[in-house]
Image (cartoon, rainbow, N blue to C red):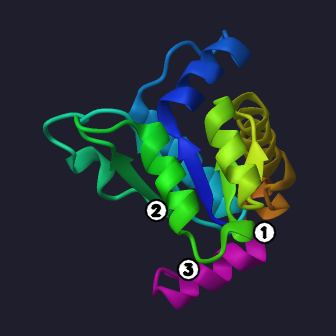
Amino acid sequence: MPYLIDGYNLLHSICKVDEELGAISDVQLCYIISRFLDEVDDKGEIIFDGKGPPDKDCFDNIKRVEVIFSGMRTDADTVIENKICSSTAPRGLAVVSSDREIRQAARSRKSKTIKSEEFWLKVQKKLSRKGKSEKEPAGKRLGLSDSETDWWLKFFGFDD
């Protein structure tokens, strides 16, 4: 289910939900969302208000996320609403915003809506779970046995 994310709305919500984290940048947010989308095997678009930074190279190599700046003639809310309206499969969209008008536009097209605070908690839960579920192999902590070491030494010609 592709995500449409109201970028600055989410950034503002993060400050409310996660005071310890403090302010994060738009680039940091995009990389975090990229990791989340990689975990859930999905893709998304993050839409920010304004022109963005003059040099947008830092947004180029972010996997699974298309970063869009609305420009000066419109705002992110309008861009998101237009994307919802022009979607050929609106029921397959997950719209992330706490903005009432965006959520209403999404509901009118039967898109899934997720408040920014709830989405951020979901992201944090998913990313924290990943690290805990991956166990380190015992061999990494214990090292090679003597016979394995001898085999590798012979294999590389150091058996003298």
Cα distance, mark 3 to mark 2? 41 Å
Cα distance, mark 1 to mark 3? 12 Å
Q: Residues within 10 Å of mark 2 (few under 14, many from 20)?
A: some
Q: Which residues are magenta?
A: 146-160
Name the residue tied to disc 2: 63
Task: Tell which tag, 3 or 2, sits nearer the viewer.
Answer: 2
Secondary element at tag 2: loop
Question: Is residue 150 in the magenta section?
Answer: yes
Q: Which mark is residue 145?
A: 1
Q: Residue at x 48, y 55 (%)?
A: 82
Name the residue tied to disc 3: 153
Left or right, 95 with respect to 52, comes to: right
Q: Quadrant of the N terminus?
A: bottom right
Q: Residue at x 27, y 45 (%)?
A: 58
Cα distance, mark 2 to mark 1? 40 Å
Q: Residues within 10 Å of mark 3 (few under 14, many from 20)?
A: few
Task: Quadrant for residue 14, please give it.
Answer: top right
Task: Quadrant for residue 2, please give it.
Answer: bottom right
